[in-house]
Image (tube, rainbow, N blue to C red):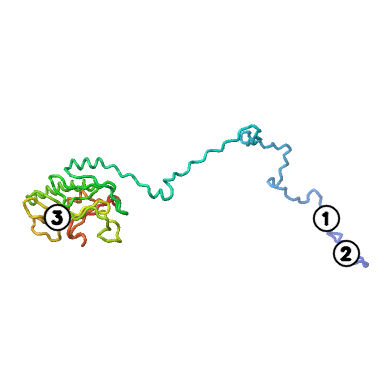
Amino acid sequence: MSRVVAWSAGCGVVLLLGAAAAAQAIPPDTAPKPPERPAGLVPAPPIADAPAPPERPAELTPAPAPKPDAGAAIPVPPPVPPERPADLSGEAALALTVAPPDDEACRTRLKRLGAAFEPLPPIAEGQCTAPLPLKVTALADSIALRPAATLTCRSAEELARWATEVQVEAQRALGKPLAALDLGGTYVCRGQNHDVDAKLSEHAFADAIDVMGFTFAGRPPIVVREAPGEAAEVAFLKAVRGKACAYFRTVLGPGSNAAHANHFHLDERERQAGHRLCE
């Protein structure tokens, strides 16, 4: 391709006539075009007639408050709850007492077991309480309680049942009938092991018995101690102590601790999961 150059001395312009002629030689239809716009980027045409939202249902529209007429009755306000009774508030609530459980069925069973007893007034010495105590003077087979026991019916019933086992063991091991149970105490308002700072003993609720010894007809009595005398006494004390565990939730005696070295402590203290303490 020839190049024609025109020189102008006045303005110093060089015309590249060959390049201009080449550009004019390209047909306009063959020039490259830009790519089309993607359909996702093309804005949708406006909707001419968009549907209007539905009207609010009449039942959901609050009704306007009616204007009171001059002669209309004034609306009655809703009732207010009653006031708290006076006996359930303040100091009166602290003075409330709970009715003791009915132990009539227990007393019937106790009579059938051959026990001699009479009701006592309710016991209330601070936290030491027994709403329905009994004074028990004797058990089956005329077994005397020396001194008389102050017990709840529940504890008196278990004592009466255990005494029948003691009578059987007395005849078997000693060949002599049991005549009396020698007691060290039943109801006493005190802490465990006579400790004033300890938790209240079951004695404080008339639910415990301390048996110091056994009296028989026709032979010397047997006292509870760590080192009993003859072999028959040893066997008797061991047997009746073991049988007590079937009737009482707590059985302590010689060997348990120093506080129970000279008696059998029997009580009805309730523990978690029905646990019993037999030592």
The CA span between labels 1 and 2 is 17 Å
Seen from the viewer's position, the closer of residues 26 and 140 is 140
134 w.r.t. 233: above or below: above
**What residue would you read off at disc 3?**
213
Seen from the viewer's position, the closer of residues 103 and 240 is 103
Q: Residue at x 48, y 41 (%)?
A: 82
Crowdedness of circle 2 by 10 Å Cα count: few (<14), some, many (20+)? few
Sequence-first tag of 1 and 2: 2
Kind of residue indicated by mark 2: Val
Crowdedness of circle 3 by 10 Å Cα count: few (<14), some, many (20+)? some
Mark 2, secondary structure of its residue: strand
Which disc, if any, is residue 23?
1
Q: Residue at x 90, y 65 (%)?
A: 7
Mark 3, secondary structure of its residue: strand
Furthest toward the top, the residue is: 71
Sequence-first tag of 1 and 3: 1
